[in-house]
Image (cartoon, grey):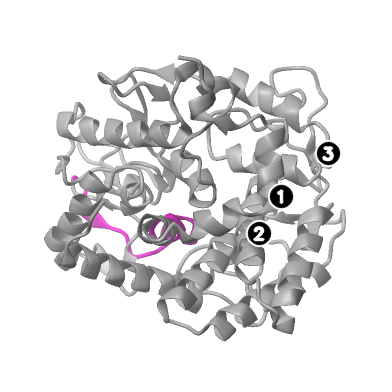
Amino acid sequence: MRLREAQKAFIDTLQYRTFLYFWNESNPENGLVRDRSTKNSPASTAATGFGVAAWIVGAEHGWVTRAQARQRVINLLRFLISARQSPDSMATGYQGFYYHFLDIKTGLRVWHSELSSIDTAWLLAGIRFARQYFNGSHPAEQQIRQLADQITFNVNWDFLTITDAGKYHGTIALGWFPEKGLHHIGWIGYNEGQYLYVLAAGSGYKNAENAYQVWLSTYEWFEPYEHLGHVGFAPLFGHQYTQIFLDLRGLVDDYMKQKKIDYFENSRRATLTQWQYAKQNPLNWQGYDSLTWGWTACDGPGPKFNFDKRVFHNYSARGIIGTQYIQLDDGTIAPTAVGGSIVFAPEIVLNTLMSMYERFKQNGIWGKYGFVDAFNLTANWFDKEYLGIDQGPILLMIENLRSALIWKYSMEDKVIQHGLERLNFTPINNIEQ
């Protein structure tokens, strides 16, 4: 899509402000990134992975130097490789995995959080991208590549395989707790866990092929509106996260071969489905229209804003698949739901983001790190905070639209290529018509 000058200027500003979250809200000594923009917030392992990619985008745009971004990355990798890996409760990780939330100063587990398979995957997504990007002869870049591989191959994916009988048998568990063991739920489709399986397959997971077939077997196909049939997952982040790092345009697996579309098209349809739903507005929330939409996991007003029969939630996974399936719609809209889909449908996303900014900047939708996490016009509520895992898709997907930077380097990674091969991804032009 050819951008107008006004659009270029807007996304320049949006990218820069969003980048500042990852630069300012990280600990420069160990590279850990805050979960959210509050002083008492711990670090989020997933936000840290997005942060690694964000620092590189910052270097590409000249907001920091390559040397500054490189140093922040190497500080993180040095911390991770030396961090305490232990089965007891006071550690940074175990079996190569990392806990969901870590103290931003010490790097130790907080909030009794789980040893998280998916958060570790997002941490490694950023690290694998950095491993490819820092390809020079500088000693620090050589060390980044060495440490990135070491951290990647330290992960024992087999440790989290669910062996109990049932629908999750043979899949990778959501996590593990030192107090009670393996999580009883495994990653089955369709959701953000797709990247996890590609990464695991590419880095030695023995059960990868079988686990991915179980994943595919649990897909649900929806036909919410004409010509918008797609594999469903109600919040948009599930359609975005994997494709921040993987360029799946023109690639299909065993399931998508039958549907004769790729995952990029699937995410485009999911985005357009939300846009259509906003125009329809079946629950009559204030403000929904073609320029005010977007549902994903995000903050919310909470019950204190309830009135009449209107019920509002705190942080929740909001999402819809047209009127066929409304997981949660309480009138709360998340700019990240829109911004993270900019590569899939730029013709509607850019107009929406710019309109949100112009109409609601005086209400508090915009601040030092760009868009706040969420807002609700029915409750007359605008968030005061920013979340790392929601800032990441905005910044990184804009960069993929503009330069395909993250896609380019991530798809050159031998680990990723091996994972895609093991899971039988093939070019869509190999489909028999």
Residue 70 lies left or right of residue 207; in this view the side is left
Residue type, mark 1 in image: Val
Q: Is residue 344 left or right of residue 315?
A: left
Give the residue type that dot 2 points to. Answer: Arg
Residue at figure coordinates x 49%, y 51% from the top left: 244
Q: Which residue is under mark 3?
A: 158
Neighbourhood count class around disc 3 (C-alpha, 10 Å): few under 14, some 14–19, many 20 upward: some
Marks 3 and 2, how far apart at CA? 20 Å
Q: Which mark is residue 128?
A: 2
Return the x and y of residue 381 as percentages of the image width and height: 24, 55
Task: Determine the secondary structure under disc 2.
Answer: helix
Which numbered marker is on residue 415? 1
Residue at image position (33%, 53%) is 339
Q: Earlier in the sequence, mark 3 or mark 1?
A: 3
Q: Which residues are magenta?
A: 378-394
Q: Nearer the viewer, mark 2 or mark 1?
A: 1
Task: Look at the image and tell me in which quarter the C terminus lies.
Answer: top left
Dot in front, 3 or 1: 1
In the rendered structure, the answer to whether residue 52 lies left or right of residue 376 reads right
Report x, y in % for residue 55. 52, 72
